[in-house]
Amino acid sequence: MPAHVGDVASAHAGRVPLAAITDRNRGRAVTTSIDLLQTLRTGLPGRAEPQRHVVIVGAGIAGLVSAMLLKEAGHRVTILEARNRLGGRIHTYRGFANGMYGEFGAMRFPRQHHLGQQLIHERFRLPTTPFPMVDEDTWVYLDGRGVRRSAFTADTFDFGLQDHERGFPPADLLRRVMTPLIELVGQPGGWAELIARYDRYSLLDYLIEQGVSEPCRALIGPVLNLEGRFHFSLAEWFTHYHEDVFGDLEYIDTGADTLAHAFGPLLLPDTRLGAEVRAIEQDPAGVVVHYRTAIGGDVAVPADECIVTVPFVLLRHMEIGGLDVAKQFNMRNVYYGRAHKVFMQFSRRWWAEDEDITHGVSVTDLAIRNIVYTPAGQDPSGQRGIIIASYAWEQDSMAWSMLTEEQRIVQAMEDLCKIHPQAAATFEMGISHDWALDPYAGGIGPLFRPHEMCSEAYDDVIRPAGRVWFANDACDLKGRRWIEGAIAAAIKNAFAIHAGMRDELPVAGAV
Ligand SMILES: Cc1cc2nc3c(=O)[nH]c(=O)nc-3n(C[C@H](O)[C@H](O)[C@H](O)COP(=O)(O)OP(=O)(O)OC[C@H]3O[C@@H](n4cnc5c(N)ncnc54)[C@H](O)[C@@H]3O)c2cc1C
């Protein structure tokens, strides 16, 4: 009988957390609830009794938060991290001129993600700046023709829309189609109903059912960045859409990696870098975690408990003892999406000087798909600047994986010049990161497919197996694929270990 595992939602006032809804749907008993934000703020309740030695595999944000909470509560922690740095998918590239930096990984932090905000603002007091996503001076470039967003109207591109779709800007078209869902979740019990009724839908299923024509999908796909999401969970996508998760974002002025580094003074003494964990054994008395370094060998670390924060897709390369078939099957089937970014450095910030673009995203149907004029990482004291010349997901990213680094830069520049001809003459250097090819990430992060959000499979994914616990950004329903989800999962697991809860993770209470 699998242990019950509740999931949690981020704090969001006035709304029933999705996870609580799915727990109710399953009719399972949830005996322990936890206020995640309060726990992050004030720590785990009481002292470590008994004190445990916990090995934490991975020093991404989930590993760091769980280690911090456990250590501050008096437990002994050992972090084993394969890379030579903290942060995992928080990865700031610092090789540009004049101290400029580029965020290969996490770069925008929603203000509504209260756990992330607590770390950034309250605990570590990192300086931040708004990261707005819309600049009317950016471009929409489709079918060989570009137009500024400010000049974009419903009639700019003739894609052969049906009569009932004509005359509406893409965002309005989408909103109209989503209105039934918006009304549904506005009713009492609406979120539960949404999940119950629509968990089996992909976004594409729903669009087709609502009568959105193929020409319309060909328009709103690239313009509203939906194309890469078409075959994934409607409910997950809708949650982000409804919350307008991209509506109020900020970046960390000093670079996102300073969030990870802020844990250093507390946790680096307990961290072994360059330690790739290969196997975890367990018996009723404890665990033994085996790692190797770049020169090989096998180092065994005995402990009382182990928290695995490594992305599930990578667990194929790790032997973990004591996992039942359902747990193995469902962890194996967590889907990880692809993504890449191609950064470029230019001798002057022509996008701002010549075109008044200060932030936001240009969208295209070219191979580069999205150009991000990142406000983060610039050096305002000089002329130079950086942009993300290509940021794409899924199949759009796969099309870059087989290119060499040189080919990627050349291809990105070719596309970029169709919209910004000044780019070539001012180009200084380019660099890309393909997350699907990153041996310690295995993709951008987990994506729900139809049937996966409220299924029991999800419980199997996140529940502990004996003395081995699982906490990463796949282990939270609402904050999945955000640092928020990783932090939430870390708090729950640290709490459960501290409280000696072997068979149950706490579920978030009212927050
Ligand atoms: C391109 C991109 C953009 C993103 N944008 C945002 C954003 O704007 N805002 C946001 O909130 N989130 C964003 N995210 C998501 C966010 O980065 C992740 O959700 C979060 O960082 C995941 O944290 P984690 O601790 O669960 O996993 P990870 O950060 O992946 O940490 C896992 C750790 O385990 C280590 N590891 C792997 N294998 C082993 C092994 N065998 N032995 C030991 N250690 C191992 C890894 O090196 C890593 O340090 C983005 C992610 C990507 C890739």
Image (cartoon, grey):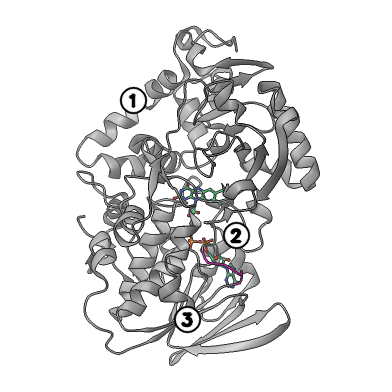
Q: Are marks 3 and 1 in contact (CB under 8 Å)?
A: no
Check disc 3: other Cα within 10 Å, few if <14, some if 14-19, many if 20+.
some
Q: Earlier in the sequence, mark 3 or mark 2?
A: 3
Q: Which mark is residue 270?
A: 3
Q: Separation of disc 3 and disc 2 at Cα?
A: 22 Å
**Magenta segment, prevailing SS (helix, strand or loop):** loop
Q: Position of residue 189 (x, y in %)?
A: 22, 42
Residue 51 vertical placement versus 178 (above, below): below
Quarter of the rendering containing residue 213: top right
Query: Magenta segment, which residues?
Result: 82-86
Disc 3/disc 1 C-alpha distance (Å): 51 Å
* Closer to the eye: label 2 or 1: 2
Q: Given the image, on which type of amino acid does mark 1 rest?
A: Thr
Q: Is residue 233 left or right of residue 13?
A: right
Q: Quadrant of the N terminus?
A: bottom left
Question: Which residue type carries mark 3?
Answer: Asp
Earlier in the chain: of badge 3 and badge 1, it is: 1
Check the image and report above or below for 337 versus 268.
above
Disc 2, ligand 1: is the CB inside 8 Å? Answer: yes
Pinpoint residue 291: horizontal percent, then vertical percent. 62, 81
- Residue under numbered circle 1: 179
Residue 410 x %, y %:
78, 36
Q: Could you tell me which secondary element the residue under label 3 belongs to?
A: helix
